[in-house]
Image: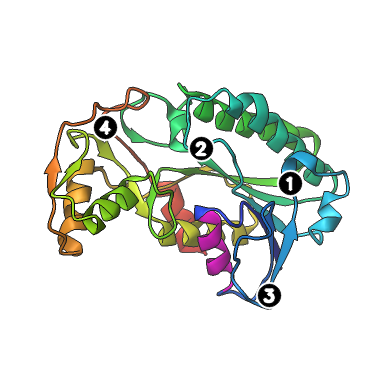
Amino acid sequence: MKVAVTGATGFIGRHVIAELAKHPVEVVAITRQPSVEMPTSPQVQVVQLDLRDACSDSINMLGNPDVLIHLAWGGLPNYRSLHHFEEELPTHYRFLQNLIKSGLKHLLVTGTCFEYGMQSGQLNERMATYPNNPYGFAKDALRAQLEYLKSLNPFSLIWGRLFYLYGDGQAENSLLPQLRRAVEHGDKSFNMSGGEQLRDYLPITDVAKHIVSLAFQGKDIGTVNICSGKPVSVRKLVEDWISENDWHIKLNLGHYPYPDYEPMAFWGDRQKLDHYMELS
């Protein structure tokens, strides 16, 4: 089996490449930044490709993969930028449409829990989507476009709706790197919100395993939440990190306001994910 991965040098991509390398498959790591260090493995081929400049022969450049894991997306973490639907959405649809029309049969694309919008509580894949920021809107629109495309050019689609991730290599402005940096600087306190919001966090290593397991199944699964299924308060999460690492720093709770683009309490239903993990 040959598996191509866009966004291979990103936070998620690096972990997905590492997970794929554990299996007897050929891997095509697609990147527009060839200078970024990639895992050295004879089974990993690096292909330089800017999706904005992708040509009609892209599928041959990628070696006609059996499945594409599409992780690439620009403009983050600015969720409110119009760039997401003005630039990213048409670029990614055009790229994926071209591959599908050229014969790609199996596609996994990562979506976002922001597609659910301001809905609270446990969120499942059967619920209607109400995205309320440009990033969530653009991702949800891409999912809808691909569903329509399937009626004309049949292919299997897995839409992996990601919740919150953490682990090695994430953006420096994310919660855990900020906390670690404060500890390394010897700060006595760490500024954060009140921390009572409930979220769904999953280690990036688990996320990568789920993405790879789903991609290997070659089924038309549709939307599936990739999540822990367990609500945890942000305060508890941070306190656990401090305890696990034996860090000595106090929390300055309430320093920042709560985000206005997400509800106070939401988490994913992972029944569908668990079903397919049992089949893998």
Task: Give percent across and percent down for residue 122.
Answer: 32, 36
Circle 3 crowding by C-alpha within 10 Å: few under 14, some 14–19, many from 20? some
User: Helix, strand or loop at disc 4?
Assistant: loop
Q: Residue at x 81, y 41 (%)?
A: 98
Q: CA distance from mark 4 to mark 2?
A: 23 Å
Image depth: mark 3 or mark 4 in front? 3
Q: CA distance from mark 4 to mark 1?
A: 38 Å
Q: Amino acid under label 4? A: Ala
Q: Is residue 20 shown in magenta?
A: yes
Q: Is residue 247 above or below residue 178?
A: below
Q: Which residue is label 3 attached to?
A: 43
- Disc sitting over residue 76 in the figure: 2
Q: Residue furthest front?
A: 185
* Magenta highlight: main SS: helix
Q: Amino acid under label 1? A: Asp
Q: Which residue is label 1 attached to?
A: 50
| Label whose residue precedes the other's in the sequence (3 or 2) | 3
